[in-house]
Image (spheres, rainbow, N blue to C red):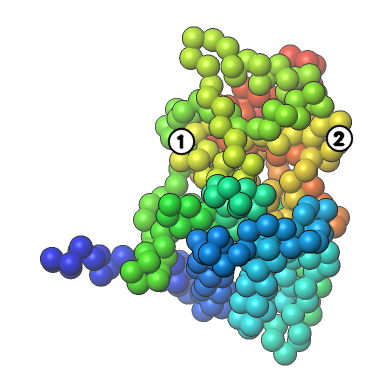
């Protein structure tokens, strides 16, 4: 800390952290492009009311959701930054039906799947929203095709999200490494490494997060599990915002479980694999938690083991601390299903 200034001159920035851990200049450029996008999106979110950015854009995105004006702007920001970075070949966005193949003369070795503004249905009421991303390295000899990104989650090189709230925090991890949180310091315009993320010892707070409005369409074991959360001497607290970034950020910090299971209306789940399930699953597992599909296609499995067939494929999501996911499994085991053993 520089004496009398309150400024830590040795604070590690996001770029410095990536360079120190990888010595890969292209990856530094990529993360700088993502960080720049997040700063621009954060500014747009803060100015949404003033700049008349609330409301619908009058279109639907690739997965049938109504697009907000900020969805469109955030998507343009991400695409422009990544395409012009010189280190990307294939981009997949929630907002675009088809993958974006970077022109050959501008291509690099990375492929990025992203949700530019997760939780945007909440934007008009000022609830926390965020950006989610997962990064692959394209296959050797490839000129950049969809096949470079239609792979299991374990093939990701790194993943993360940025949450836009009272503070702007970018949570990021390399495959197999620790999960680090970088807070945007507005005085210098840089993301500064502020803490290491890990599930609280013993599981932390007992919190369940799900959309109970869908409960009539759930399997009976899920209904029984959620009912059990709410009884006993010390029942679980219910917290659900409808913004995956906000709910997962809280789950990582406080503990608990986040659930968006398959149901009768959406037997394959609602959340998208490439740019929601995979990145969050990597972070959850590397923080010491479990990221499961729940009952999906007749069995239980890791989200990161799923191989998507299409860029907008979906899967059910059950993720959180080990204590709480195992509690969830117990109800399926009682119903006669074979469940994973921790």
Identify the residue at image location x=53%, y=70%.
Answer: 40
Residue at coordinates 72% horizontally, 29% vertically from top-left? Answer: 213
**Nearer to us in this view, 317 or 166:** 166
Point 25% across, 65% down: residue: 8
Q: In the displayed orientation, state which residue is furthest to the top.
A: 233
Residue 69 falls in which quadrant of the image? bottom right
Rendered image quadrant of residue 56: bottom right
Q: Position of residue 316 (x, y in %)?
A: 75, 39
Residue to which mark 1 is pinned = 254
* Residue 224: percent from left, percent from top: 71, 16
Task: Answer above or below: position of 221 versus 34.
Answer: above
Discs 2/1, front: 2
Q: Which residue is mark 2?
A: 265
Name the foreground residue: 20 vs 265. 265
Percent x, y of residue 271: 74, 46
Vertical placement of residue 273 versus 94, above or below: above
Side of 52 relative to 63 (left or right): left
Per the model, the C-alpha gap separating discs 2 and 1 is: 31 Å
Q: Is residue 342 visible to us here?
A: no
Residue 299 placement, left or right of 286? right
The C terminus - image quarter: top right
Q: Earlier in the sequence, mark 2 or mark 1?
A: 1
Label 1 packing within 10 angstroms: few (<14), some (14-19), many (20+): some
Q: Residue at x 52, y 54 (%)?
A: 163
């Amino acid at each position: 800390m520089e004496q009398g200034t309150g400024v830590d001159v040795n604070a590690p920035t996001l770029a410095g952290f990536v360079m120190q851990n990888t010595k890969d200049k292209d990856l530094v450029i990529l993360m700088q492009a993502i960080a720049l996008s997040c700063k621009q999106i954060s500014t747009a979110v803060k100015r949404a009311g003033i700049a008349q950015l609330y409301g619908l854009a009058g279109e639907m995105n690739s997965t049938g959701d109504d697009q907000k004006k900020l969805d469109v702007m955030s998507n343009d920001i991400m695409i422009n930054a990544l395409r012009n970075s010189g280190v990307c070949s294939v981009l997949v966005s929630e907002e675009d039906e088809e993958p974006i193949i970077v022109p050959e003369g501008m291509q690099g070795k990375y492929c990025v799947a992203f949700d530019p503004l997760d939780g945007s249905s909440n934007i008009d009421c000022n609830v926390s929203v965020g950006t989610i991303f997962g990064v692959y390295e394209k296959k050797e000899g490839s000129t950049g095709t969809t096949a470079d990104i239609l792979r299991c989650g374990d093939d990701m090189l790194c993943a993360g999200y940025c949450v836009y709230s009272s503070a702007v925090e970018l949570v990021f991890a390399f495959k197999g490494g620790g999960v680090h949180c970088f807070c945007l310091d507005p005085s210098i315009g840089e993301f500064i490494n502020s803490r290491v993320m890990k599930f609280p010892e013993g599981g932390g707070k007992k919190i369940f997060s799900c959309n109970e409005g869908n409960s009539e369409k759930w399997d009976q074991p899920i209904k029984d599990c959620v009912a059990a959360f709410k009884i006993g001497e010390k029942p679980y607290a219910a917290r659900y915002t409808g913004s995956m970034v906000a709910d997962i950020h809280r789950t990582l910090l406080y503990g608990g479980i986040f659930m968006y299971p398959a149901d009768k209306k959406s037997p394959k789940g609602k959340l998208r694999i490439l740019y929601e399930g995979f990145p969050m699953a990597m972070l959850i597992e590397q923080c010491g938690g479990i990221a499961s599909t729940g009952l999906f296609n007749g069995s239980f499995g890791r989200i990161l083991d799923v191989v998507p067939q299409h860029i907008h494929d979906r899967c059910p999501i059950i993720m959180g601390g080990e204590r709480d996911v195992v509690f969830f499994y117990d109800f399926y085991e009682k119903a006669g299903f074979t469940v994973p053993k921790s």
